[in-house]
Each structure stands twice: as structure tokens, then as C-alpha cells.
Image (spheres, helix red, strand yellow):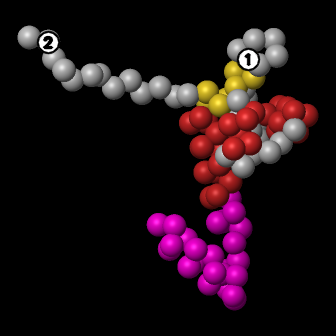
């Protein structure tokens, strides 16, 4: 008897520039090149001579580092601190 359970394959999809823009990352080609050359953005994978893509997991991890850096730089007193604390609680 054949099993009806399908194995799950964990695939890390590629994102191209359109996917980056949909995620709110709207950098031009030159800016992206400067960022990944300075190791401030994940390096792309070249699919062809003119097609660059990024791993979705790497982009999401990069976004996470930005969120953490913003939280670390947030003020600790005053109105902005209270707003940031309330926002962090709402997201959790």
C-alpha cells in the first residue's frame, strides 16, 4: 500500500528586484551593489548574465537586523520611548 503522506521539502525561494520592492526594499542597482560590496546587504546569486536574485531567508534576516538596530537605537525616556515600547508590545 502506498503512503499518501507527501514529504515536505523546505525550499528557500529566490527573490528578484520586484520581490524586494514588494517587501519595501526599493534601492536602485547602484545602491544595492554598493551595499552588498560593503557587506551591508546580502550578496546576490547570479542566475544569468543579467539576472540577479537573493535568497528570501537572507533578505528576511537582513530586515531583522535592521529592526534590531532600530530598537537598540530607540530612546529610553520620554514620549518616543513610550511609543516604541507600546509598539513593541503590540507586535509581540
Q: Main secondary structure of the magenta part?
A: helix
> Where is residue 67 drawn, in percent x and y?
64, 58
Give the residue at mark 2: 2
Question: Looking at the picture, how far across and down is residue 7, in whole percent?
Answer: 29, 22
**Residue placed most toward the observer, 49 or 45:** 49
Looking at the rendering, the stretch of residues picked out in magenta corresponds to: 69-92
In magenta stretch: residue 90: yes
Q: Is residue 32 magenta?
A: no
- Depicted 71 relative to depicted 19: above or below: below
Residue closest to the far bottom: 78
Local crowd size for mark 1, using a 10 Å CA cut-off: few (<14), some (14–19), many (≥20): few
Rendered-image quadrant of the N terminus: top left
SS at badge 1? strand
Asked if residue 82 lies left or right of residue 18, the reply is left
Asked whether 61 or 50 is in front, the reply is 50
Image position of 11 with respect to 50: above or below: below
Query: Residue 47, percent across and down?
Result: 71, 14
The residue where tag 1 is placed is 46
Amino acid at each position: 500500500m502506498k503512503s499518501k503522506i507527501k514529504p515536505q521539502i523546505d525550499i528557500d525561494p529566490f527573490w528578484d528586484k520586484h520581490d524586494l520592492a514588494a517587501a519595501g526594499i526599493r534601492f536602485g542597482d547602484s545602491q544595492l551593489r554598493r551595499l552588498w560590496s560593503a557587506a551591508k546587504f546580502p550578496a546576490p546569486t547570479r542566475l544569468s548574465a543579467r539576472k540577479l536574485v537573493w535568497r528570501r531567508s537572507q533578505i528576511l534576516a537582513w530586515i531583522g537586523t535592521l529592526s534590531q538596530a532600530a530598537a537598540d537605537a530607540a530612546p529610553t525616556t520620554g514620549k518616543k520611548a513610550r511609543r516604541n515600547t507600546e509598539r513593541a508590545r503590540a507586535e509581540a
